[in-house]
Image: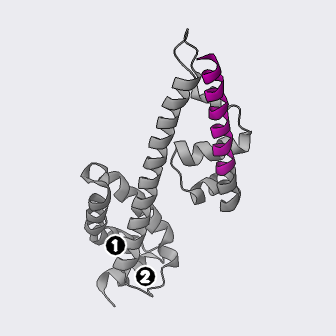
Amino acid sequence: MEELTRLATRAGTGDPEAIRAFVRRAQPDVWQLCSGLVGREHADDLTQDTFIRILRALPAFRAESSARTWMLRITRYTCADWIRGRQRRRRLEQQAVEVTRLTTPAETGRVDLDDLLDHLPPERRDAFLLTQVLGLSYAEAAEVAGCEIGTIRSRVARARAALVAELDDDRSAADAHG
């Protein structure tokens, strides 16, 4: 058994010295993968996020694969979640710009995205904000909302459909007046 795997197994029992040694030994690999996947400017934050996940998962680590493989898989998932969240935020920002352009009364020049989201039922709005604005994974959003992942997925899909329908209504109204 390699040293890192031995450390991970001991750390999983709650041994504070093993936890410190594991993090010191694992940190360069985790940081390097984060840096390669998301860029150096975000690597420190994602390395920290990854270690939060790794340390929570350590008690369940069974050494069926090497600790290095196991922790790099967690690192990859953490980075992928971050990238998806960033893409969702960009899409939402683009949609907000489009909503503003289509629904803004000429005299004010502004629309409040909160007002637009207020038309959604509270549980759909919460699911949408948790995943699309705050960038939480569906699993994290489900944990925050106290429901199943499938429920979050359904609420987000329904929120998106309602927002698209509202955009379509606004486009139709703008076309009729324009």
Q: Is residue 136 above or below residue 93?
A: below
Q: Identify which residue, 178 or 59, lies in the foreground.
A: 178
172 falls in the magenta region: yes
Residue 117 seen: no
In what element is the residue under mark 2?
helix
Q: Which mark is residue 9?
A: 2
**Residue drawn at the location 69% of the way across and 48% of the way down:** 158
Q: Is residue 127 left or right of residue 71?
A: right
Q: Which mark is residue 22?
A: 1
CA gap between label 1 and label 2 equals 10 Å
72 falls in the magenta region: no
Q: Residue 99 location in percent, x, y?
A: 55, 29
Q: Residue 159 location in percent, x, y?
A: 67, 44
Q: Is residue 60 left or right of residue 169?
A: left
**Residue drawn at the location 25% of the way across and 66% of the way down:** 28
Label 1 close to label 2 by CB (< 8 Å): no
Dividing the image into 4 quarters, which one contains the N terminus?
bottom left
Q: How is the image coloured?
A: one colour
Q: Amino acid at mark 1?
A: Phe
Q: Is residue 43 left or right of residue 144?
A: left
Q: Which mark is residue 167?
A: none
Q: What's drawn in magenta, residue-wise?
A: 156-178
**Residue drawn at the location 65% of the way across and 21% of the way down:** 176
